Amino acid sequence: MQEKLVELKEAALASLSDVKDLAELNDLRVKYLGKRGALTEIMKGMGKLSPEERPVMGQQANEVRAVIESLLKEKTEAFEQAILQEKLESQRIDVTLPGRVVARGAKHPLTLIVEQIEDLFIGLGFEIAEGPEVETDYYNFEALNLPKDHPARDMQDSFYITEDILMRTHTSPNQARVMEAKQGEAPVKILCPGRVYRRDDDDATHSHVFTQIEGLVIDENIRMSDLKGILLFFAQEMFGSDVEIRLRPSFFPFTEPSAEVDVTCAVCHGTGCRVCKDTGWLEILGSGMVHPKVLEMSGYDSEKYTGFAFGMGVERIAMLKYGIEDIRHFYNNDLRFLKQFNRR
Ligand code: 2NL
């Protein structure tokens, strides 16, 4: 029996010395020390030994088991260490690498200009009023002295959603809403920016969606000179303190009298050039004294109150200010265009 134990020990140590991986180690563990392994097999012979031999053999068997077990443990740890090392090697990360730069968004140039214009008028005591882009026929046309059969309704072909609901064609409906809500109370001093929609074919100077800013002032004794003074201030803040403005007679259904407003050409400073078609002037907005019918329709006593209003296309203002030649730049979202307005 002692011989068998020694043989077993030698065989186990020999096969453990060139084991390749954890799986083989486990096979050997089962083979030598398992419930039905070689050592158990030998131990079955214990019963045949004399009472004196038994403890001696028992002790030797335990020693053999201990030697094999310790070698198994040593090998197991070595393999596990190797596996960990390989993982650390293959999954290595360089914590000193610079992070990927997250591209930061910025305000759209139209937003920047709208905010700039808002700030100018806030400085003059105006309040900003915004309203829905989907409007009723009443606020978009009716309340602005454009009844159903009015020829001016054909002038601006609109996007209708139902017979009575459309995409607003200007921001004036918003102003009509404010007037109505005030129930004939003065003063009104509001600036209404927003997107408006018209059924135009898009080209370099027309877009079916564009940004409008309208202003409205109602109080006692509001005169055309008030309009002119405020618009001169606006033009000089926007285009430079040396520019002048010029009012030309015009027509809008919601104002009477009406005027188109020109500003000194920023390119040639009034001497005449290609941009201003040799006139020295560039048209920047439409304006006028609020039509008495519009005042009355929204609840104002036109005998007591007068008002002025104006409306401008923000894209056009921006194009003149920055020399942008195509309105579609504002809607293509080409970063090469957009980034020019957000240098950091
Ligand atoms: C333009 C011309 C204009 C108005 C808008 C207005 C609003 C009310 C009453 C009277 Cl509530 N008028 N707005 C007046 C004159 C001209 O816009 O060419 N816009 C791009």
Image: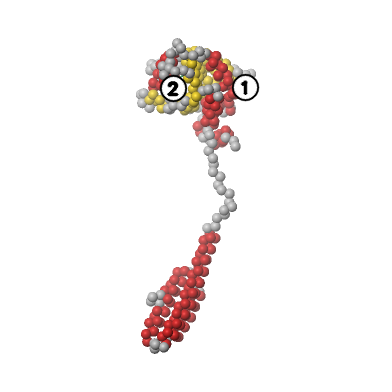
Q: Residue at x 54, y 36 (%)?
A: 106
Quarter residue 175 falls in: top left
- Tell me: 252 left or right of 165: right
Q: Which quadrant would the C terminus be assigned to in this image? A: top right
Q: Which mark is residue 241?
A: 1
- In this rendering, does residue 98 appear at all? yes
Q: Which mark is residue 95?
A: none
Mark 1 or mark 2: which comes first in sequence?
2
Which class describes the residues within 10 Å of circle 1: few (<14), some (14-19), or many (20+)? few
Provide the residue designation for mark 2: 178
Quarter residue 134 falls in: top left
Seen from the viewer's position, the closer of residues 104 and 301 is 301
- Tell me: 99 left or right of 255: right
Which class describes the residues within 10 Å of circle 2: few (<14), some (14-19), or many (20+)? some
Amino acid at the residue labelled 1: Ser
Q: Residue at x 60, y 18 (%)?
A: 244
**Can you say whether 26 is above or below 204 in the image?**
below
Q: Residue at x 59, y 52 (%)?
A: 96
Seen from the viewer's position, the closer of residues 281 and 14 is 14
Q: Position of residue 297 (x, y in %)?
A: 41, 16
Q: CA distance from mark 1 to mark 2?
A: 33 Å
Amino acid at the residue labelled 2: Val
